[in-house]
Image (spheres, rainbow, N blue to C red):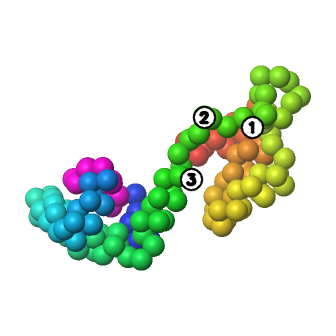
Amino acid sequence: MDGIGEKTAAHLLTQVGPMRTVWADIDHLGGSTVAATLDSWAVETGARRMGTTVVRRLSAPGARERYDFNVRMMSGRDDLDLGITPDVPGTAGLLPLDTHRVHTVVSYLGVESTTALAVRVLSTDPASAAARSTWQTEA
């Protein structure tokens, strides 16, 4: 979400609770409880006060839609038959995947860094020494 990175999101969820609680406070109280909770935590810990800024960013036009989209994109699905048979040698689903296909599918998201990562990871033979060393150095 614009302006809310992983650290701020972690503080938000740790201090306020699940997003349904955050959205309810924004809907019914204009985010006053969220802002007060985050600012109180900041005073206690010596962190920067961020309550009003977080509420403003969550209340911005399109913020909830972006959040909902991100949740849908990051949620795993187990109800799709992709026709992949990774347990059968020589069939679709075994790595490496075709570079062009990976690029076509992932580039739909419009995030070049994500596309590049997907191409690098999914189009590389995981059994190769080069792939193992790349993964080990990134870990």
122 is within the stretch colored magenta: no
Q: Which residue is mark 1?
A: 82
Q: Which residue is mark 2?
A: 78
Callout 3 touching callout 1 (CB < 8 Å):
no
Residue drawn at the location 30% of the way across and 75% of the way down: 56
Of residues 97 and 75, which is closer to you in this image? Answer: 75
On residue 73, which mark appears? 3
Query: Which region is colored magenta?
Result: 7-19
The secondary element bearing badge 1 is classed as loop
Q: Amino acid at mark 3?
A: Met
Whether residue 90 is visible here, answered yes or no, is yes
- Farthest residue toward the right? 90
Of residues 139 and 2, which is closer to you in this image? Answer: 2
Whether residue 35 is visible here, answered yes or no, is no
> Compared to 127, does 15 lie above or below?
below
> Compared to 86, does 12 lie above or below?
below
Callout 3 touching callout 2 (CB < 8 Å):
no
Q: Amino acid at mark 1?
A: Leu
